[in-house]
Image (spheres, coloured by chain):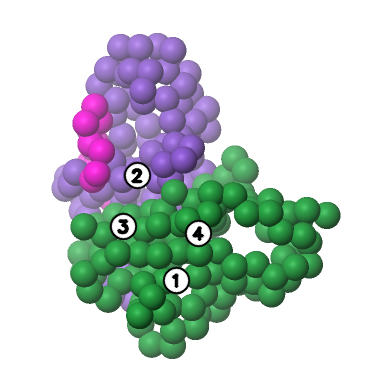
Amino acid sequence: DVKVTQSSRYLVKRTGEKVFLECVQDMDHENMFWYRQDPGLGLRLIYFSYDVKMKEKGDIPEGYSVSREKKERFSLILESASTNQTSMYLCASSLPGPLQMETQYFGPGTRLLVL
Amino acid sequence: AQSVTQPDIHITVSEGASLELRCNYSYGATPYLFWYVQSPGQGLQLLLKYFSGDTLVQGIKGFEAEFKRSQSSFNLRKPSVHWSDAAEYFCAVGAVGGADGLTFGKGTHLIIQP
Protein backbone atom coordinates (compact mmCIF):
# COMPACT_ATOMS: atom_id res chain seq x y z
CA ASP A 1 0.00 0.00 0.00
CA VAL A 2 1.14 3.48 -0.83
CA LYS A 3 2.52 5.40 2.12
CA VAL A 4 3.79 8.93 2.56
CA THR A 5 4.67 9.95 6.10
CA GLN A 6 5.50 13.33 7.54
CA SER A 7 7.61 13.66 10.66
CA SER A 8 5.16 15.75 12.67
CA ARG A 9 1.41 16.35 12.60
CA TYR A 10 1.67 19.55 14.63
CA LEU A 11 4.61 21.88 15.17
CA VAL A 12 4.98 25.13 17.07
CA LYS A 13 8.04 27.29 16.43
CA ARG A 14 9.18 30.82 17.19
CA THR A 15 9.91 33.55 14.68
CA GLY A 16 13.46 33.30 13.41
CA GLU A 17 13.91 29.62 14.15
CA LYS A 18 15.16 27.22 11.50
CA VAL A 19 12.50 24.61 10.86
CA PHE A 20 12.82 21.22 9.19
CA LEU A 21 9.82 19.35 7.86
CA GLU A 22 10.55 15.79 6.85
CA CYS A 23 8.73 13.60 4.37
CA VAL A 24 9.37 9.95 3.64
CA GLN A 25 7.76 7.72 1.03
CA ASP A 26 8.10 3.98 0.75
CA MET A 27 6.97 3.56 -2.85
CA ASP A 28 10.29 4.15 -4.62
CA HIS A 29 8.81 7.23 -6.31
CA GLU A 30 11.10 9.51 -8.25
CA ASN A 31 9.02 12.67 -7.85
CA MET A 32 8.35 14.41 -4.58
CA PHE A 33 6.55 17.67 -3.83
CA TRP A 34 5.93 20.16 -1.06
CA TYR A 35 2.74 22.20 -0.94
CA ARG A 36 1.28 24.59 1.56
CA GLN A 37 -2.44 24.77 2.13
CA ASP A 38 -4.19 27.88 3.38
CA PRO A 39 -7.92 28.54 3.77
CA GLY A 40 -9.39 30.09 0.65
CA LEU A 41 -6.17 29.61 -1.30
CA GLY A 42 -6.14 25.85 -1.82
CA LEU A 43 -2.80 24.13 -2.28
CA ARG A 44 0.20 25.96 -3.65
CA LEU A 45 3.38 24.29 -4.80
CA ILE A 46 6.54 25.33 -2.96
CA TYR A 47 9.23 23.03 -4.38
CA PHE A 48 9.45 19.71 -6.13
CA SER A 49 12.14 17.20 -6.95
CA TYR A 50 12.30 14.65 -9.72
CA ASP A 51 15.45 12.90 -8.62
CA VAL A 52 17.95 12.70 -5.80
CA LYS A 53 19.80 15.99 -5.35
CA MET A 54 17.54 17.66 -7.92
CA LYS A 55 15.08 20.40 -7.03
CA GLU A 56 12.84 22.82 -8.84
CA LYS A 57 11.05 25.89 -7.59
CA GLY A 58 7.31 25.83 -7.54
CA ASP A 59 4.95 28.77 -7.39
CA ILE A 60 5.90 30.13 -3.95
CA PRO A 61 9.51 29.16 -3.09
CA GLU A 62 10.45 32.38 -1.27
CA GLY A 63 11.51 31.76 2.30
CA TYR A 64 11.91 28.02 1.78
CA SER A 65 14.58 25.59 0.67
CA VAL A 66 14.60 21.83 0.20
CA SER A 67 16.93 18.89 0.41
CA ARG A 68 16.78 15.50 -1.28
CA GLU A 69 19.80 13.40 -0.35
CA LYS A 70 17.99 10.07 -0.63
CA LYS A 71 15.26 8.97 -2.98
CA GLU A 72 12.73 8.27 -0.26
CA ARG A 73 13.21 11.48 1.74
CA PHE A 74 12.39 15.07 0.87
CA SER A 75 12.92 17.80 3.44
CA LEU A 76 11.44 21.28 3.50
CA ILE A 77 13.48 23.90 5.34
CA LEU A 78 12.34 27.24 6.65
CA GLU A 79 15.63 29.08 7.10
CA SER A 80 14.15 31.71 9.41
CA ALA A 81 10.53 31.07 10.23
CA SER A 82 8.08 33.93 10.03
CA THR A 83 4.48 34.22 11.15
CA ASN A 84 3.25 34.28 7.55
CA GLN A 85 4.58 30.76 7.18
CA THR A 86 1.99 29.48 9.62
CA SER A 87 0.17 26.95 7.47
CA MET A 88 -0.58 23.33 6.72
CA TYR A 89 2.27 21.70 4.79
CA LEU A 90 1.58 18.71 2.59
CA CYS A 91 4.12 16.40 1.03
CA ALA A 92 3.36 14.23 -1.98
CA SER A 93 5.13 11.76 -4.23
CA SER A 94 4.52 10.23 -7.64
CA LEU A 95 6.03 8.06 -10.31
CA PRO A 96 7.15 9.61 -13.57
CA GLY A 97 5.86 8.44 -16.94
CA PRO A 98 2.61 8.89 -18.84
CA LEU A 99 0.46 6.29 -17.10
CA GLN A 100 1.34 7.22 -13.58
CA MET A 101 2.01 10.82 -14.28
CA GLU A 102 0.79 13.25 -11.75
CA THR A 103 -1.10 10.72 -9.68
CA GLN A 104 0.26 12.14 -6.51
CA TYR A 105 0.01 10.44 -3.16
CA PHE A 106 -0.17 12.74 -0.19
CA GLY A 107 1.00 12.56 3.37
CA PRO A 108 -1.27 13.54 6.28
CA GLY A 109 0.18 17.04 6.53
CA THR A 110 2.07 19.03 9.14
CA ARG A 111 0.27 21.94 10.73
CA LEU A 112 2.91 24.54 11.56
CA LEU A 113 2.30 27.47 13.87
CA VAL A 114 4.95 30.20 14.00
CA LEU A 115 4.67 32.50 17.00
CA ALA B 1 -0.08 29.30 -17.29
CA GLN B 2 -2.50 26.66 -16.17
CA SER B 3 -5.25 27.45 -13.70
CA VAL B 4 -8.21 25.79 -12.05
CA THR B 5 -11.42 27.43 -10.89
CA GLN B 6 -13.85 25.91 -8.46
CA PRO B 7 -16.64 28.47 -8.40
CA ASP B 8 -18.40 27.14 -5.31
CA ILE B 9 -16.62 27.68 -2.00
CA HIS B 10 -19.32 25.89 -0.02
CA ILE B 11 -22.10 23.54 -1.08
CA THR B 12 -24.80 22.10 1.17
CA VAL B 13 -26.62 18.96 0.10
CA SER B 14 -29.16 16.77 1.87
CA GLU B 15 -28.15 13.22 2.57
CA GLY B 16 -29.36 10.99 -0.27
CA ALA B 17 -29.52 13.83 -2.76
CA SER B 18 -27.40 14.06 -5.87
CA LEU B 19 -24.23 16.14 -6.02
CA GLU B 20 -22.33 18.04 -8.66
CA LEU B 21 -19.14 19.98 -7.91
CA ARG B 22 -17.92 22.27 -10.62
CA CYS B 23 -14.40 22.61 -11.94
CA ASN B 24 -13.15 24.71 -14.84
CA TYR B 25 -9.59 24.71 -16.03
CA SER B 26 -7.35 26.73 -18.27
CA TYR B 27 -4.59 24.91 -20.04
CA GLY B 28 -2.92 25.18 -23.42
CA ALA B 29 -2.98 21.51 -24.36
CA THR B 30 -4.82 18.38 -23.33
CA PRO B 31 -4.83 18.48 -19.55
CA TYR B 32 -4.43 15.74 -17.03
CA LEU B 33 -7.26 16.28 -14.54
CA PHE B 34 -7.79 15.06 -11.01
CA TRP B 35 -10.24 15.21 -8.17
CA TYR B 36 -8.96 14.82 -4.62
CA VAL B 37 -10.88 14.70 -1.36
CA GLN B 38 -9.62 15.85 2.02
CA SER B 39 -11.42 14.80 5.17
CA PRO B 40 -10.94 16.97 8.27
CA GLY B 41 -7.39 16.72 9.61
CA GLN B 42 -6.32 14.37 6.82
CA GLY B 43 -4.16 14.49 3.74
CA LEU B 44 -5.55 14.36 0.22
CA GLN B 45 -6.94 11.19 -1.29
CA LEU B 46 -7.29 10.68 -5.02
CA LEU B 47 -10.92 10.17 -6.10
CA LEU B 48 -10.39 9.87 -9.84
CA LYS B 49 -8.31 11.09 -12.74
CA TYR B 50 -8.58 11.73 -16.45
CA PHE B 51 -5.71 11.33 -18.87
CA SER B 52 -7.33 10.40 -22.17
CA GLY B 53 -9.99 8.16 -23.71
CA ASP B 54 -13.49 7.88 -22.33
CA THR B 55 -14.54 11.30 -21.08
CA LEU B 56 -16.66 9.86 -18.26
CA VAL B 57 -14.40 8.47 -15.57
CA GLN B 58 -15.36 6.44 -12.57
CA GLY B 59 -13.67 6.85 -9.24
CA ILE B 60 -13.78 5.52 -5.74
CA LYS B 61 -16.65 5.96 -3.28
CA GLY B 62 -19.24 6.11 -6.07
CA PHE B 63 -17.94 9.34 -7.64
CA GLU B 64 -17.65 10.03 -11.34
CA ALA B 65 -16.51 13.00 -13.40
CA GLU B 66 -17.00 14.07 -16.97
CA PHE B 67 -14.39 15.82 -19.08
CA LYS B 68 -15.91 18.34 -21.47
CA ARG B 69 -13.25 19.90 -23.67
CA SER B 70 -15.64 22.40 -25.25
CA GLN B 71 -16.51 23.79 -21.82
CA SER B 72 -13.07 23.34 -20.24
CA SER B 73 -14.81 21.57 -17.40
CA PHE B 74 -14.31 18.48 -15.30
CA ASN B 75 -17.30 18.34 -12.94
CA LEU B 76 -17.55 15.78 -10.18
CA ARG B 77 -20.84 13.97 -9.57
CA LYS B 78 -22.37 11.49 -7.21
CA PRO B 79 -25.96 10.25 -7.51
CA SER B 80 -26.63 9.93 -3.78
CA VAL B 81 -24.42 11.46 -1.08
CA HIS B 82 -23.75 9.99 2.33
CA TRP B 83 -22.94 11.88 5.53
CA SER B 84 -19.38 10.54 5.27
CA ASP B 85 -18.91 12.50 2.03
CA ALA B 86 -18.66 15.75 3.99
CA ALA B 87 -15.16 16.99 3.20
CA GLU B 88 -13.14 19.43 1.13
CA TYR B 89 -12.90 18.60 -2.56
CA PHE B 90 -10.10 19.79 -4.80
CA CYS B 91 -9.87 19.76 -8.56
CA ALA B 92 -6.37 19.82 -10.04
CA VAL B 93 -4.68 19.95 -13.42
CA GLY B 94 -1.30 18.47 -14.26
CA ALA B 95 1.26 19.42 -16.86
CA VAL B 96 1.93 17.13 -19.80
CA GLY B 97 5.26 15.34 -19.66
CA GLY B 98 7.81 15.83 -16.89
CA ALA B 99 7.36 15.92 -13.18
CA ASP B 100 5.85 19.32 -12.51
CA GLY B 101 3.51 19.69 -9.61
CA LEU B 102 -0.22 19.98 -9.85
CA THR B 103 -2.17 23.21 -9.98
CA PHE B 104 -5.08 23.03 -7.58
CA GLY B 105 -8.35 24.87 -7.35
CA LYS B 106 -9.17 26.56 -4.07
CA GLY B 107 -11.48 23.79 -3.04
CA THR B 108 -15.19 23.27 -2.40
CA HIS B 109 -16.35 22.55 1.11
CA LEU B 110 -19.19 20.03 1.05
CA ILE B 111 -21.70 20.04 3.90
CA ILE B 112 -24.21 17.22 4.24
CA GLN B 113 -27.54 17.96 5.88
CA PRO B 114 -29.33 15.09 7.62
Side of A79 where B65 appears, left or right = right
- Residue denoted by label 3: B3
Q: Is residue B47 visible?
A: no
Secondary structure under the numbered disc 1 in the rendered image: strand
Q: CA distance from mark 4 to mark 1?
A: 12 Å
The residue at the point 49 percent across, 83 percent down is: B56
In magenta, the rendered stretch is A58-71
The 10 Å Cα crowd at callout 1, few under 14, some 14 to 19, many 20 or more, is many
Q: CA distance from mark 3 to mark 4?
A: 16 Å
Side of A12 where A30 appears, left or right = left
Secondary structure under the numbered disc 2 in the rendered image: strand
Q: Amino acid at mark 1?
A: Phe
The outermost residue toward the bottom is: B54
Which label was assigned to residue B36? Answer: 4
Letter of the chain in purple: A
Which label was assigned to residue A44? Answer: 2
- Residue denoted by label 1: B74
Letter of the chain in green: B
The 10 Å Cα crowd at callout 2, few under 14, some 14 to 19, many 20 or more, is many
